[in-house]
Amino acid sequence: MNAPGTFHIEARDGQARTGRLTTAHGVVETPIFMPVGTQGTVKSLCPRDLTELGTQILLGNTYHLYLRPGDELVAKMGGLHRFMRWDGPILTDSGGFQVFSLSGLRKITSEGVEFQSHIDGSRHFFSPEKVVSIQKNLGSDIMMVLDECVPFGADKAYTEKSLALTTKWAGQCRAALPPGSGQLMFGIVQGGFFKDLRRQSAEEICSLGFEGHALGGLSVGESRAEMYDILHAAAPFLPDAKPKYLMGVGAPSDLVEGVAAGIDMFDCVLPTRNARNGTLYTRKGKVNIKRAEYREDDSPLDPDCDCYACTNFSRAYLRHLYIAKELLSYRLNTIHNISFFLTLMRDVREAIRQGRFAALKAEIQAMYPPDGVDKRPE
Amino acid sequence: MNAPGTFHIEARDGQARTGRLTTAHGVVETPIFMPVGTQGTVKSLCPRDLTELGTQILLGNTYHLYLRPGDELVAKMGGLHRFMRWDGPILTDSGGFQVFSLSGLRKITSEGVEFQSHIDGSRHFFSPEKVVSIQKNLGSDIMMVLDECVPFGADKAYTEKSLALTTKWAGQCRAALPPGSGQLMFGIVQGGFFKDLRRQSAEEICSLGFEGHALGGLSVGESRAEMYDILHAAAPFLPDAKPKYLMGVGAPSDLVEGVAAGIDMFDCVLPTRNARNGTLYTRKGKVNIKRAEYREDDSPLDPDCDCYACTNFSRAYLRHLYIAKELLSYRLNTIHNISFFLTLMRDVREAIRQGRFAALKAEIQAMYPPDGVDKRPE
């Protein structure tokens, strides 16, 4: 096996590309979607479900795991992989986004950010070094640097100041985990909705020797047009030879838009959260399983899907479980939505290899029009 | 395969016996514990989980399935087996118990019972013929007759009057489903806590040609001593050659007490409900998984258990999932508790075959002392 961090690009189709990223827990085929396992589990699923779904890499949330059960406990239990019995690659975020979106009372200084736990109100402090230390304890294959996710609508002066802080913190994070440890570290490019600041941030961040780079600060309340504008402007600033990760995005239309801009990695709570809300994805459009029209519908949710839910149960049964608030509803719906997202990305990779990605992108965006705003929920 | 309803007793040890009951969906080895799948699913589990656990027969709740999704819908979808994709035997209760324990505003007449749905307050009427019709729609392998479950503390006059009604209804149920249809029907012996009435009820009910007989009206608020007293008095009134079912019971101590009295079949929500409350069963006693002592406990919940939860995860992880209210907690806990109950009954059958059931009963009752009151919850 190649050393962790090795990234081979295998095929190209426009800006889109397929590749293979080596981590300490195996190789990830890109472009890839990472299901979100916030608290050491992808909600309602066990590791066997994830393996059967062909999951290649999970995302874990540093903020949540730090607060509960605690990264030191996870370290004592042998790290997050062993704790949750997932042998594949894990990427952990830095916790910064959740500090800004979930926790109470935040105070940012150049040293880091003070915040209150959303669970019990207790006070905590994340410095760049602290979030690296936490992610070392978790033992993630890919860790993310601490950054400030600039709020949507921030003006240029604020964004510029924030960018400087994000660059400073990125340098501290890299210093706290030099290359070659086995754990990879990705830098995060910010710069809000200002293209010159995106360029500046990319130049600064990408000079620090990270094994990959992310675009942060998107899907924070902007329109699809604004998101795609910045996406296409900013993605080319990232070095082509390393993995590019679009954080917290997205809907099916966003995934193919990101791939078209050269993005290799995605994560989003949309498939899992929507599963629990009864919103299910198919290649013929979304299905709201609670609708009365499915009451006596004996057909599978998606006849083209080979997941456990679609190959065993009827829409009528899935609707019944949802209406009756049965726990099995959440699990079957989640299995299906994860299957949809992973299958979509498998098809994306195949389309790129065959030089027909543009057609697949058009098909997906016709079915899932890239309008409206999908806020990042967790 | 033998005709549905065939019951062969294979081994005896005192009053305890092992047997094989043939149903339209397969043979059930007795004594057996039936996990409760109230609304067309054993809460949090899918059919594959149940198969892997060695589940031989499930219980479905007529009251719940009638109200939601409706027995006519289930019939249109090909019956409960096909609807929930469970190919093994299913026993359905008559709904009577839930009418008395869950629904609002009940009015009993000699024709049946009027009640209000606990879901939407709508009014409904269960007659003996109606509950047979519902259970025909569900397609259960074993259906139960409509009875009145006498409240704990009822006096003899009330109990005697109720007994007459239960006998009348039982006759009407049998008339609505004559023997030989493929679906079996069990009568229910009532009589409260009066042994002479238990004898009278058994004589009346067991003369009606049912394929099996149940003791109803126990585990309704009485002490363990009172329950066991009636159990041992009433079980011998049931014909030895047919299956004997103790409804809504019980805790581990009750299962072995019942087996000692010659009971062949049991159901109870205790393992599934307690799983969701974090109370887990092991042969070394109950484990309350939320306790702080398990915070850093890297050992399996039960090293002697071969279920998916015990062979993969630590107590620390199970505690974390429970504390974090993760959906996976309910599933793993349920898998374990069902495994415990089914393994216990497998051990009971083996002990009977080997003539050492008394020792197993003593072991279980030492670990789970038969004191206190476990109310029937659903």
Image: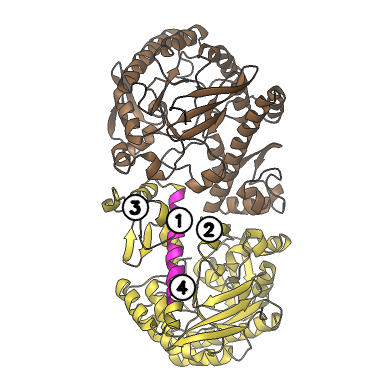
Chain colours: A yellow, B brown
Residue at the image position 69 percent from the left and 80 percent from the top: A177
Which badge, 1 or 3, is on the more N-terminal residue?
Answer: 1
Nearer the viewer's eye, disc 1 or disc 3? 1
User: Residue flagged by tag 2: what amino acid is it?
Assistant: Asp
**Label 4: chain?**
A
Magenta stretch encompasses residue A76: no
Closer to the chain start, of discs 2 and 1, is: 2
Chain holding disc 1: A
Upstream in the sequence, badge 3 or badge 4?
3
Mark closer to the chain start, 2 or 3 = 2
Q: Tell me the subunit letter for badge 2.
A: A
Q: Amino acid at mark 4?
A: Arg
Identify the residue under disc 3.
A315
- Which residue is found at the position 36% from the left and 47% from the top? A320
Q: Which residue appears at 58% of the width and 20% of the height?
A: B223
Residue at 40% across, 76% down: A254
Where A4 falls versus A65 (above or below)?
Answer: below
Dot 3 amino acid type:
Arg
Where's residue B242, x and y in %? 49, 19
Q: Quadrant of residue B185?
A: top left
Residue denoted by label 4: A346
Q: Nearer the viewer, residue B320 or B266?
A: B266
> Is disc 4 placed on a helix, strand or loop?
helix
Determine crowd level at label 1: few under 14, some 14-19, many 20+ residues with C-alpha closer than 10 A.
some
Please tell me whether mark 3 sits on a helix, a strand or a loop.
helix
Q: CA distance from mark 1 to mark 4?
A: 18 Å
Tell me the CA gap for discs 2 and 3: 21 Å
Q: Which residue is mark 2?
A: A49
Which residue is labeled 1 in the image? Answer: A308
Q: Is residue A81 above or below residue B172?
A: below
